[in-house]
Image: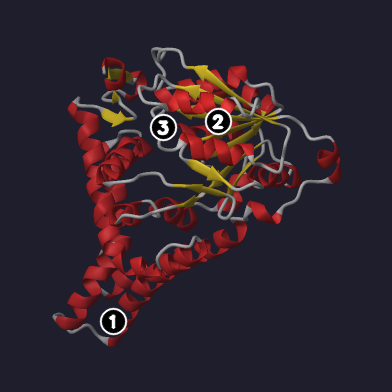
Amino acid sequence: MLIYNYIITSIFVLIFINFLVNSILFKNIRKYSLPGHIVKNPPLVSILVPARNEEKNIRRCINSLTKQDYKNIEILILDDNSTDGTSGIVKNIIQRDPRVKLFSGKPLKKGWLGKSWACHQLSRLAQGSFLIFTDADTLHYRDSISKNLAAMTANNLDGISVYPRQITVTFHERMTVPFIIFAILTFMPLVLIKYTKGPFFSTGIGQFFMFKKDAYEKMGGHEAVKSEILEDIHLSKQIKKAGFKYMVFDGNGSIYCRMYGNFSEVINGFTKFVCSAFNYNGFMEFTALSAFSIFFLFPFVLLPIGYLFLDWSGTLFILGFIQVFLILAIKVVLAIRFKGRVIDSVFMPVSVLYMLFIAVNSYRKSKSGKGLYWKGRTYNVENEDTIELIEDCYKNS
């Protein structure tokens, strides 16, 4: 037990050091400003928004985009076969701002997943030299576009992905959504994203991508990731694979998003991609879940058991305490930086149990033939090489 705790504590120290380095490298886009030559002659930026039954979000999203301090933009909305009032809301906005354009999405093409197909159609319609792909449930402060373009220019990049501040309201959201940024800043060495050419060290979030148009086209665009559930991660790998420069940034203060609104959305949202993160490989997922439990669940279980029932020695207790302390320190720092609830940090074991349940549920659904559900579409992913649409409930409604 003593050797085990020495090993785990040593690994935790390395994880914590990586987290501290990442916290410095994960720069906020608000620190950048556009150079004079772009201010004088701003290139056209195409903002591309796929929308599928987004009547609750689309007005707020588009209104925030029309109020940008960067004026040379076009805002293209693709109505992806919605059955609600999405298109009507967009048409009303078009009447007062001609920069907003609405297009009707074509039926889902065989071999494609819904979001990638929608983004691909939008990219073919865009006229700008820069392309921004952003979700309909995002909210943009007035400097969002200018700061992102400034970050790309200052760092001489061909593409970026920016992590919005995630709005979490319900307990279910607060236990799951923060794990995205927790995992990235804890495990991914961000310095290797920018300074390595291989695609292994790469990540991104589909809520906001920005590309130089020529780089996007040369890397194959969304067509290169057309059948990937995690199209955002694969886009980040694709641009590096094509030899372009890419980095991730902190969008806190400029971009906001509420990913999910209730328990059902949380479960469906995370279920659809967890298994795909391990290439639908049961052994890989089991190994990862075991390691995840050892590092982020067991310390909270072993420390009180060891102290109350096993008469742990001073050294064992100190090592267990260090493990719990480092986990909570990371959670507290993230909560403060991204304006979450610090008190939620003490629920870390509960968060881990949420993610373990979701991971098991994702694998079960992936292999059961029932498929993975999102945005009204259910996909069969039993064979990851031939992902197929099982049902489109919006189409049948």
Label 2 crowd (10 A; few <14 / some 14-19 / many >=20): many
Against 385, is 54 above or below? below
Where is mark 3, residue-wise?
54
The Cα–Cα distance between marks 1 and 2, rounded to whole angstroms, is 46 Å
Rendered image: mark on residue 317:
1
> Mark 3 belongs to which amino acid?
Glu
Against 306, is 31 above or below? above
Against 314, is 95 above or below? above
Q: Earlier in the sequence, mark 1 or mark 2?
A: 2
Q: Quick one: quadrant of the C terminus? A: top left
Q: Residue at x 24, y 27 (%)?
A: 371
Where is mark 2, residue-wise?
238
Q: Quick one: quadrant of the N terminus? A: bottom left
- In the image, which is nearer the foreground, mark 3 or mark 2? 3
Rendered image: mark on residue 70:
none
Residue with the most extreme left position? 309
Q: Is residue 201 visible?
A: no
Please name whichever residue, 30 or 370, is drawn nearer the observer in this view of the structure: 30
> Mark 1 belongs to which amino acid?
Phe
Q: Earlier in the sequence, mark 3 or mark 2?
A: 3
Where's residue 120, x and y in %?
53, 21
Where's residue 220, x and y in %?
58, 22
- In the image, which is nearer the foreground, mark 1 or mark 3? 3
Residue with the most extreme bottom position? 314
